[in-house]
Image (cartoon, rainbow, N blue to C red):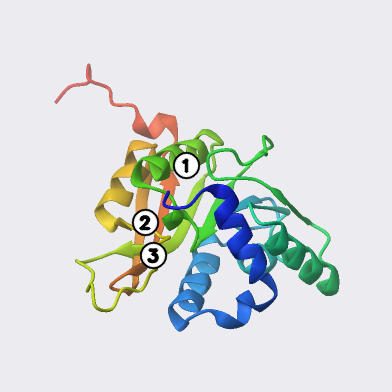
Amino acid sequence: MKKTIDEHAERFSEKATEYDGSKSEEYHACRSLVIEHAAPTSEDIVLDLGTGTGAIALALAADAKKVVGRDISDGMLAEARRKADEAGIENIEFGDGRFRDPNYDGPVSIATSNFALHHLSDDEKRDAIETIAALEPDRFVLGDVMFFETPDPEAPFYSPEVDDPATVGALADMFTDAGFVLTAVERVHPQVGVLVGERVPIDRQTIDYDSDR
């Protein structure tokens, strides 16, 4: 991580009220794909990490049993709560939490995140994905800045001074190492995409080495 958690939190709190109106077409395309792939039902509890102003969490609340949004920025969380109150959404909870310490130990069937994980180093991303996997969601949907090819140094989609994106291949390895099967890869831009990981039930992972061949 190129900035401390407190520095990131302060940076996002300062721009919370203008955040939604400042995002790119690629961000909104990613958001739509994350919502589409998350696809919660009335039985699902969704954990949205790096929830920001609640763009993903609020959209999923209509179909989910409950949505839990976690972020490090008080300003962003305040904006998310304001939007939930204005919309009359009651099955949603926003609070402080981090990728590697979500501050939540309840059941999770779907985990989501959009445009947040790229602030972590690759080692920190791996720890974060392992933390998410330990909550045993059936599905993890990640939209983020990620490299499908070598980025053009003259036209970076991200801010090199604060962001630390990974390659798609590195993220795919992190997903599979944490026990997810990668079921979808959506390329939005050479530096932006969505990955979907599904947990394989234990009985499907078991191989009977004593069976006839």
Q: Nearer the viewer, residue 5 or 29?
A: 5
The image shows residue 25, relative to residue 16, as above or below, that is below
Q: Secondary structure at mark 3?
A: strand
Going by the image, does 47 lie left or right of 118?
right
What is the residue that sits farthest to the left in this orientation? Answer: 213
Depth check, mark 3 against mark 2: the one in front is 2
Res 25 label: none
The answer to whether residue 50 shows anywhere in this view is: no
The residue where tag 3 is placed is 145
Q: Residue at x 59, y 63 (%)?
A: 11
Amino acid tagged 2: Asp
Q: What's the distance in space between the residues labelled 3 and 2, CA to CA?
A: 9 Å
- Which of discs 2 and 1 lies nearer the camera? The answer is 2
Q: Against 148, is 208 above or below?
A: above
Q: Position of residue 138 (x, y in %)?
A: 52, 45
Residue that badge 2 annotates: 164
Q: Which of pointers 2 and 1 lies earlier in the amino acid sequence?
A: 1
Q: Quadrant of residue 168?
A: bottom left
Alpha carbons under labels 2 and 1: distance apart: 14 Å
The mark found on residue 128 in the picture is 1
Q: Position of residue 96 (x, y in %)?
A: 69, 48
Left or right: residue 177 versus residue 55 is left
Disc nearer the start of the sequence (3/2)? 3
